[in-house]
Image (cartoon, grey):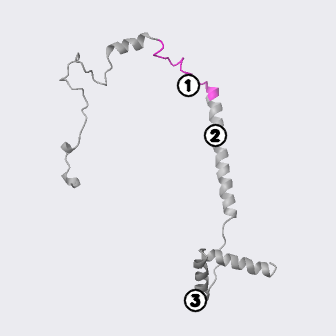
Amino acid sequence: MSKSGLELGDFTIASRTINKTEEPGAANPSPAEPDIESKDQASTSPHLVRGAKDTPGLERRTSAERERRAKEQAIAQEDARYDIRKLKRAKEREVKFFVNVALDQATKARLKRAADENDLKMASVLKAAIDAYLSANGY
């Protein structure tokens, strides 16, 4: 079925209004309207309904508390920014320095074969070879 073949009638659309065919006193009240008895119980029983004062997480903070909390959050964000900056600087210290080396075909083929046989990258083989050479010559 292509997009151009779809019509509005192909989709199920919920109605916005309650069906008027159902009578208000019908045995199956709609789920959107709770029955009247439960409304009366909720309004009369204090253990079912809590006010904003009874709920522990809904107390209003004073402006001083809000300001203190905003400052604490700003300090925490600033610390996080500094930590990220420190990580980036540490990573930059470990930046690799590239050296362009012109190799003849035979040397490059040997390098590639050594890297493939040892399951390494050619760059790591070159690095190890340069390190071995420098160590052997006292550098």
The percent position of residue 69, horizontal first and vertical second, equals 63, 32
The reply, left or right, for residue 50 in relation to residue 90 is left
Marks 3, 2: nearer the viewer = 3
Examine the structure image and report whether residue 51 is included in the region drawn in magenta.
yes
Question: Magenta segment range?
Answer: 46-65
Give 93 or 35, whichever is nearer the viewer: 35
The percent position of residue 114, horizontal first and vertical second, equals 61, 81
The percent position of residue 105, horizontal first and vertical second, equals 58, 89
The amino acid on which the numbered mark 1 sits, given as a three-letter code, is Gly
The amino acid on which the numbered mark 2 sits, given as a three-letter code, is Ala
The amino acid on which the numbered mark 3 sits, given as a three-letter code, is Gln
**Mark 3, residue position:** 105
Residue drawn at (25%, 21%), measured in percent from left and top? 28
Residue 74 quadrant: top right
Nearest to N terminus: mark 3 or mark 2: 2
Nearest to N terminus: mark 1 or mark 2: 1
Residue drawn at (24%, 32%), measured in percent from left and top? 15
CA distance for labels 3 and 1: 74 Å
Residue drawn at (67%, 50%), measured in percent from left and top? 83
Q: Secondary structure at mark 3?
A: helix
The reply, left or right, for residue 14 in relation to residue 127 is left
The percent position of residue 136, horizontal first and vertical second, equals 79, 81
Q: Which mark is residue 74?
A: 2
